[in-house]
Image (cartoon, grey):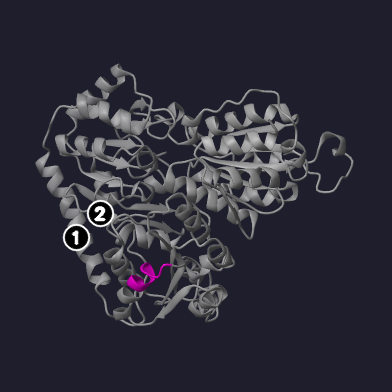
Amino acid sequence: MKAYEYLAKMLHDYGTTHFFFQEVVLRMTAKEAEAKYGIQGIMAHSEVAAGYMADGYARASGKVGVCAAQSIGAANLAAGLADAWLGTTPVIAITGKKSPQYQYRHAYQEMDHTKLYEAATKFQADAVEAEQLPRLLRACYKEASTGKPRPVHLDVRGLTGFEGEQAELSEPYMAEPEYGFAPAQRMLADPAKVQQAAARLAEAQKPILVIGRGAYMSGAGAEILQLMESCNIPAVTTPDGKTVIDEKHPLWAGIVGNYGMSCANKAVAGADLVIFIGTQTADQTTLDWNVPKPTTKAIQIDIHPGELGKNYPDCVGLAGDAKSVCGQLAAAATPAKHPEWAKTVQGYFADIDAMQRKRMASDDGPILTERLCGDLAAVLPDNAVLVSDTGYSAIWTATYMRMKPGQRYMRAAGSLGWSFPAALGAKCGTPDRPVVCFTGDGGFYYYLGEMETAMRHGINTVTVVNNNGLLSQCAGSIMAQYPEDPQAAVQKITYGTFPFAAVAEQFGFYAVRVEKAADIKPALEKALAAGRPALVEVVTAATGSDPLPAMV
C-alpha cells in the first residue's frame, strides 16, 4: 500500500470529513481522500485561517480537526493553533519538511519546525522515514483526543510531504477510530474521592457550580442537571461552558468571570463551596483569582490530574471525564435544598437580567449592540451553533444571549478574527446545523477574504458584523492614556466607514445592511433562510454601548 493510500484511509476511518490547508501539501493524499472516501479538502486563503477552520470543525463536531501546510507555511499554521491550544481543542497540524539530505545546507524553505510548534502543541513527531507515518499519525490522533485535548504536530518528509506520501509501506493497515473523537476515553474518578467530595458537599450551606468548557466537550449537561436539582445548587458557566445547561433554568445564575456578569461573580464570591467542573480556574474565570478567594473550599472535576487544586488548594480533586464523574457525584450526593441561598442567588440574577432586558428592548439610534444580541437570540434556531469572536463580541453574546441546551456556543479563546474562519469549519463539521458567526468590524477585517472560500465550497453560514467603526474594547483604555485629548485618542483605533454588505454581495453572498433596530429581526430571518452564504451588517453605536461591568 502506498503511504498516501494508507493516510487517506486513516483519515476516513478516524471520522474526518474535511481537512483544511493552504497549497501545496499532501496532494496525493488529498486526491485519494476525496476520490475514494469523499473527504473534502478546504483550501483557505492563509495557513492561519486553515488552522482556525480546523479548530472550529473540532469544537463543533467533537471530532479531531486536521489542517496542513507546506514547509514555509508551517510558521503561519503554528500561529493558527494558538487558539486551539488555549481553547483545549484536538487538532492535528501536518506540515511538509525538507528531507535530511537538504537540511543544514540553506536549502529552499529549510526550517526547523519543532520550535515553532512547541508553545502550541502537546505532542510533536517527525516522520523522517515513511514507515513511521502510520504509527505516528495514530499517535497524533491519540494524543489530541485523550487527556486534556490539544493540538499536535506531524512533520512529513519532503517540502510538501510528497516524498513521504509516495513511499511504499509494508506495514499491515491498522487504525484506532475511537481516537477520532474527544473525549476518546471516559475515565471515572476514584470512588473514595467521590465519597469525600459528597461529604464536603453535604456540609456546605452555600454551594455553587462553575461549569466550563470541559463539561461542554464531555456532554455533561444531563449529569450536571441531576446534581443541580437533587441538591438545589445554583450554577454559573464560563463563556465556554455556555449551553451546557438551559439558561432559563431557575438555578442558572449567569456567566462568570471577566467576560461575565456581576450577578454570577457576586454569587461565586459569596459561596462557601465552589464546585469547578471542566474549568482551569484561570484568571479570566476567577477575576485574577479573587472570585472566589484562594482559601475557598472547592471540589474540582478535571480530566487532567495536574489541574486539581492548582489555584484553589483547599480542594477535593476528582480526576476524570466530566460527564462520568458528575454522574458519580450526583449518585453519591445527599439531596439538599439550601432555599435561602438559592433565593439570594436568584435575586442577584433577576436584578441584572432586568437591566439587560431594558437594553435589549431599546429602540435607540444608533442601534445598541445589546438590542442586536437580543434580536439574534430570538430568531436563532433551536439547533444553531453560534460562533463568537473575542473581546466585546464575546462579552455581549455570552452575557446577553439566553441560549438553550440544543444550541451550541463557541468563542475565540483570545485571537481576534478567529470567529469567521472557525464558523466555516464549524459548518463543515455540523452541516445539518445552522451556523451563525458574530464578529465586530475589527475582527472581520482579519480574514475577510475567506468569503471567497465560503462561496467556492458552498459553506452556508450567516455572518453578523457588528459594525461600530472602531475597536470598541480598546476605547476606554486609550482615552484614559490621553486625558489631554481623549476624543483624538479614539481616532487611533477608529476605522473609516466600510460597506461590508456591499462587498459581501460582490463575493456572491446574500447580504444586507441594517441601520434601524426594527429591521434587525427581518434581516436575520432572511439571512438564515437564504440557502447560501449570508452576511448581515448592523451599524451600531460606536460608544456608550459597553457591556455591563463584571463587578458592581
Q: Quadrant of residue 260?
A: bottom left
Q: Which residue is mark 1?
A: 351
Which x, y percent locates residue 103?
A: 84, 38
In this rendering, does residue 149 appear at all? yes
Residue at image position (73%, 41%) is 161
Disc 1 packing (10 Å; few <14; some 14–19; many ≥20): few
Residue 23 rendering spot, x and y as whole percentages: 69, 54
Quadrant placement of the C terminus:
bottom left
- Residue drawn at x 58%, y 34% is 10
Q: Position of residue 42 (x, y in %)?
A: 58, 54
Task: Tell me the residue at 38%/71% (across/down).
Answer: 527
Please rate how many residues cluster around mark 2, counting C-alpha atoms within 10 Å: few if below 14, some from 14 to 19, many from 20: many
Q: Are marks 1 and 2 in contact (CB under 8 Å)?
A: yes
At 87% from the left edge and 45% from the top edge, which residue is drawn? 107
Quick check: can you spot residue 147?
no
Q: Amino acid at mark 2?
A: Cys
Work out which residue is located at the far front of the displayed protein and give it: 36
Residue 543 in percent (x, y) is at 41, 75
Q: Which residues are magenta?
A: 524-531
Secondary structure at numbered mark 1: helix
Q: Nearer the viewer, residue 173 or 146?
A: 173
264 horizontally vs 408: left or right: left
As helix, strand or loop, the secondary structure at mark 2 comes to helix
What residue does disc 2 label?
Answer: 263
* Relative depth, front residue between 515 and 260: 515
Secondary structure mostly seen in the magenta stretch: helix
**Eyeballing the image, is 330 above or below 485?**
above
Q: Position of 294 compared to 345: left or right?
A: right
